[in-house]
Image (tube, grey):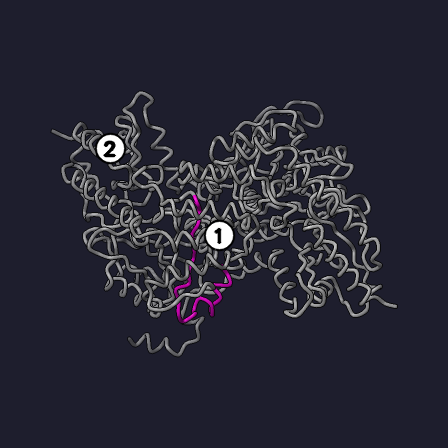
Amino acid sequence: MEKEKENAGKPLEEKWHFGHNKAAAAAGSRSIRGTLSKVIASVEETGPRPLIQLGHGDPSPFPSFRTTPIAEDAILEAVKSAQYNHYSPSSGLLPARRAVAEYLSKDIPYKLSSDDIFLTAGCAQAIDIVIAALARPDANILLPRPGFPLYDARCTFYNVEMRHFDLIPEQGWELDLDQVEKLTDENTVAIVLINPNNPSGSVLKYQHMEEIAKTARKLGIMVISDEAYGHLTFGSNPFIPMGVFGDVVPILTLGSISKRWVVPGWRLGWIAMTDPKGILSETKVIDSIRSILDITINPVTFIQGAIPQIIEKTKDDFFNNIIHVLRGAAELCYNKIKDIKCITCPHKPEGSMFVMVKLNLSYLVDISDDVDFCIKLAKEDSVIICPGSVLEMKNWLRITFAIEPASLEVGLERLKSFCERHGKN
Amino acid sequence: MEKENGAKPSSEEEMMERWRFGENKAVAAAGGRSIRATLNKVVSSVDENGPRPVIPLGHGDPSVFPSFRTTPIAEEAIVEAVRSAQFNNYAPTNGVLPARRAVAEYLSKDLPYKLSPDDVFLTAGCAQAIDILVSALARPNANILLPRPGFPMYEARCTYTNLEMRHFDLIPEQGWEVDLNQVEKLADENTVAIVIINPNNPCGSVLKYQHMEEIAKTARKLGVMVISDEVYDHLTFGSNPFIPMGVFGNVVPVLTLGAISKRWVVPGWRLGWIATTDPKGILRKTKVVDSIRSILDITTDPATFIQGAVPQIIEKTKDDFFNNIIHVLRDAAELCYNIIKDIKCITCPHKPEGSMFVMVKLNLSYLVDISDDVDFCSKLAKEESVIVLPGSALEMKNWLRITFAVEPTSLVVGLERLKSFCERHEKN
């Protein structure tokens, strides 16, 4: 009772032993979600409508991007069977892993087995697990700049040192491999590639990918190939899975159904061991992944149950249509931007759902940087774009073109009008 | 594999030298503490030519059994959500609003105050809630009080995040109540929380009001929050009713964890929550809520269409369904308790009255050639194809955790085989 009286007057921090976790806050701050919510918060209630979202990569609500009924039917069948309400085994259901193995094997020169596949709750969880698995004391990992901030967030969270190498705008956003070699030391464990690329919309060429593989082998590091946008290419460079070079260097391929099937809310992805020499097994990296999977949640069991049908029965028509819409949207976006003086696009997008463009502040009055640009654009024109600062590219912008084409037109017109309004005379 | 100069590597050492990546030992340590890992070992002892079918009394998942099939209303809600094509998108960080509202209303029914949707954070099951919470609390030097026996996911996550664990006992002779004297001795200025699992896994006990009030007061005195893991909420069938710890939210800040996994028997759907049952807003003021949100911002979410189905699942499920599940569990618990009474080498200190499990003590002195609980379970798996969890996995050596939530006919077979095994190995 006395201690309670004593406690009564104390400030909260003294009375209660729990409090703010600064490390968690640091990791959480590196999220696109977090920054975009600040931009969205600037939208005026009385501003133009509708709100045009060119900031995040999720076209699933739009009619032109609706997923195939085959995928929906597969889910419904799995649910109604009542065969998939149980906990999933750690790596995922066998038929689902087998289906993913066959799916990925189509485009590489060797066959994957179901044991090479680990199902995850989306590519986001795949990233979480892979970074966690590599997080030994003193380890560092090479990340692209611009990149996908979830890698940075997870590295911060797991105390893995990050070293950023540049993607070169003037060279189709290819990797600066000289810089990669300079950044690497004996504690470097892996290099992350995102291809087709978020945020730049570039697609890597065969020869460059082969160079990357050889460089990684020389440096003794693995390649983490984030292929969440696998097959979503519509320019001159075809999609080539990095696993094609699995004989040269061990590769962990990350992927999901989120983008190709336009169902990011379904949370179904994978980590694939595209490593025919079994180096990742011998070095026990796979054991580490398995240990983590033993204490981690799995994707929804009935969604796993639907995977074989989703993968095997989806028709090419559906895929071709999505590509067609993306191609048209990318074209529209690129052409409109050419007309905007204060924005330059160094490389026409040919894959994924995004393009990186440079802001030329010297053409603008009273805009201080990319974040300021995006906040004012949201406020005045109800258009949301992702500031490049989130991706460590200050005074660049990431624009999503994967939205309903009619809305994309409106959004780009408003963007143009905003730039003219703030342009110098 | 060739080296740069064309020569083949001669040894494993060379392999390790050549590649800079390797095993994460910290993670290996954490993974080993999982029920999955322990059960996998026991299951591997099952003989190809042994009795069939294999009777799984080791893990808590009755969803595959006809008597436990979930309500068609839940399945319909999912079907509707998928068909609407309104839920294929990424969900907002905390979860879709209608789902959070539905959970807030659901939990508020049993509390003396109302939760708002902002008090609810959706997670991919209770397991992910534990993951997120442990990460949020894992500040340097912090420690957490965990029950023994407990649920090893807490231990695994603490090992992994370096949150120091201090275990307090649940007292078998006192209905598995918390040893509060011991709790006070264990706590220091770095203790951040005490975890209570009620209804209890693995003991099958249900806490009484007065004891819960004492726990709350003790926690307040010690300056720690209560994490109340209520994944088995409402699954009680004995004399003690289910009381949410949030009832004492005015006394001490309580974080309530829950899910639809157990009550609706759909653990594979991965839909759970963290709720701040903390009417004084202390968890918000001390920024624990901010920490949780930061982690949620970089963490994968429950499937959006399952979130979309939650309001219908919660609001339309009939009491008939719930009552039926309780009925099946009650009978199964009774059956289990009665058969165990007939087994000499096993003692059950407290008749189960909730959840899906019971902890029983192994009396090795009655047995020939069984060295401990792990040995017992391996031999039982091999000779009788019955799976039971060794208490060692829960830090209770020479105890066993038995699941009674299986198809009643299978339960009878399993317990008979268990009895027969014991008789076979008992001293004359």
Q: Which residues are magenta?
A: B269-292
Q: Looking at the picture, how far across and down is residue B236, in whole percent?
A: 26, 52
Q: Looking at the picture, how far across and down is residue B366, in whole percent?
A: 15, 35
Q: In the visual, does A103 lie left or right of A394?
A: left
| Residue B283 drawn in magenta | yes
Q: In the visual, does A273 lie left or right of B210?
A: right
Q: Secondary structure at mark 2?
A: helix
Nearer the observer, A155 or B330: B330
Q: Secondary structure at mark 1?
A: helix
Circle 2 is placed at which residue position? B414
Q: Is residue A146 visible?
A: no
Q: Tag 2: Cα neighbours inside 10 Å, few (<14), some, or many (≥20)?
A: many
* In the rendered image, residues at marks 1 and 2 fall on the same chain: yes
Q: Is residue A136 above or below residue A32?
A: above
Q: Give the label on residue A70, or none.
A: none
Q: Looking at the picture, how far across and down is residue B251, in whole percent?
A: 33, 69
> Which subunit holds the residue at mark 1?
B
Nearer the observer, A275 or B58: B58
Q: CA distance from mark 1 to mark 2?
A: 39 Å
Q: Is residue B248 above or below residue A234?
A: below
Q: Amino acid at mark 1?
A: Gly
| Residue A77 drawn in magenta | no
Q: In the visual, does B417 lie left or right of B32?
A: left
Q: Amino acid at mark 2?
A: Gly
Q: Tag 1: Cα neighbours inside 10 Å, few (<14), some, or many (≥20)?
A: many
- Disc with the residue nearer the chain's start (1 vs 2): 1
Q: Looking at the picture, how far across and down is residue A174, in whole percent?
A: 76, 42
Nearer the observer, A348 or B178: A348
Residue reaching furthest to the right: A425
Circle 1 is placed at which residue position? B308
> Which subunit holds the residue at mark 2?
B
The total of numbered circles placed on residues is 2
